[in-house]
Image (cartoon, grey):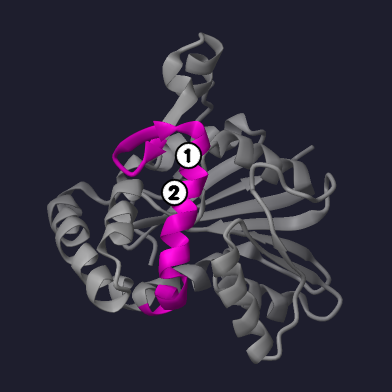
Amino acid sequence: MSAPGDGVRPPAGDSGGKAAAEAGDPAADATHFGFKTVPLGQKAEKVAEVFDSVASRYDVMNDLMSAGLHRAWKAFTVRHAALRPGMKVLDIAGGTGDLARAFAQRVGPTGEVWLTDINGSMLGVGRDRLLDEGVVLPVAQCDAEALPFPDGRFDRVTVAFGLRNMTRKEAALREMHRVLAPGGKLLVLEFSRVWKPLAPAYDAYSFGVLPQLGRLVAGDAESYRYLAESIRMHPDQPTLGALMESAGFGRVRWHNLSLGVVALHEGVKFL
């Protein structure tokens, strides 16, 4: 499932966004929402509107738009988490609970898995689904940029298809580093930069088929147009690796899945 191009990030310096902020660049007070530029304070509200709209049909759309591949991508992530009984896991932007369920099976009754999401609609769907399956986990609605957990609380932190929606990715990554115990690992599963020869077909699907699929199944074309745009605005594999290093992670590497449609980034907290 991994594609050629799996990589290890070479040493990197500060990101351009940080430099712009330090220089007082007015652009530092704005961010992107898809291809639009919006004030920093508005992105979270706009993202919330998207997920409020699609929450009830989220899993159905995931299966349709990825032809079921999202299940394989998540299974790959679970294997790389290398969980053991008794471990503590924080699943950020956990949505409908797919990863949290799998993690809970692996850490067992002596472990602990928190399902969190900033969006109450998504979190409610995930919580109710897990309860219907007899899986009882601690649940918290919280912002990844200001996590309500003490330093060094978790052995693993995961975020799947959520980082690209965060307003201040650098701040969120620093928070993930903070709540990890020394030796703990962060895993970021996210849409990424596709293999270049595949890009024209992928663009045609993303901007032509995907919004129409959203309109027919979820009654919402615009949210899935935002999805396609947000993927293009998200940092590519090396850039995300550099952001993780800037947040304090070491041994940063990534695995390209499905020819780079998705990448799993890993980083370790040493101190």
* Main secondary structure along the magenta-highlighted residues: helix
19 or 38: nearer the eye? Answer: 38
The residue lying at 74 percent from left, 69 percent from top is 113
Give the residue drawn at x 65%, y 77%: 127
Which stretch did the figure color magenta? 32-60
Which residue is situated farthest in the top direction here? 23
Outermost residue toward the bottom in this view: 133
The residue at 51%/55% (across/down) is 162
Residue 33 part of the magenta-drawn span: yes
- Mark on residue 42? 1
Tell me the quadrant of the picture where the N terminus can be found. Answer: bottom left
Pointer 2 local density, CA inside 10 Å: few below 14, some 14–19, many at least 20: some
User: Where's residue 224, x and y in %?
Assistant: 30, 60
Mark 1 surroundings: few (<14), some (14-19) or many (≥20) residues within 10 A:
some
Task: Please state if 44 lies on the left or on the right of 154 as rendered.
Answer: left
Q: Position of residue 251 (x, y in %)?
A: 61, 41
Marks 2/1: CA–CA distance:
6 Å
Q: Are marks 2 and 1 in contact (CB under 8 Å)?
A: yes
Q: Amino acid at mark 2?
A: Lys
Above or below, comparing residue 112 to residue 44 in the picture: below
Q: Nearer the viewer, residue 256 or 131?
A: 131
Residue 163 left/right relative to 270: left
Secondary element under disc 2, as helix, strand or loop, is helix
Badge number at residue 7: none
* Picture layout, residue 164 above or below residue 27: below
Q: Is residue 187 left or right of residue 61?
A: right
| Residue shown at the point (51%, 10%) measured from the top left | 24
Residue designated by label 2: 46
Element marked by disc 1: helix
Q: Is residue 260 visible?
A: no
Q: Please name the amino acid that badge 1 sits on.
A: Gln
Instruction: Look at the image and tell me in which quarter the C terminus lies.
Output: top right
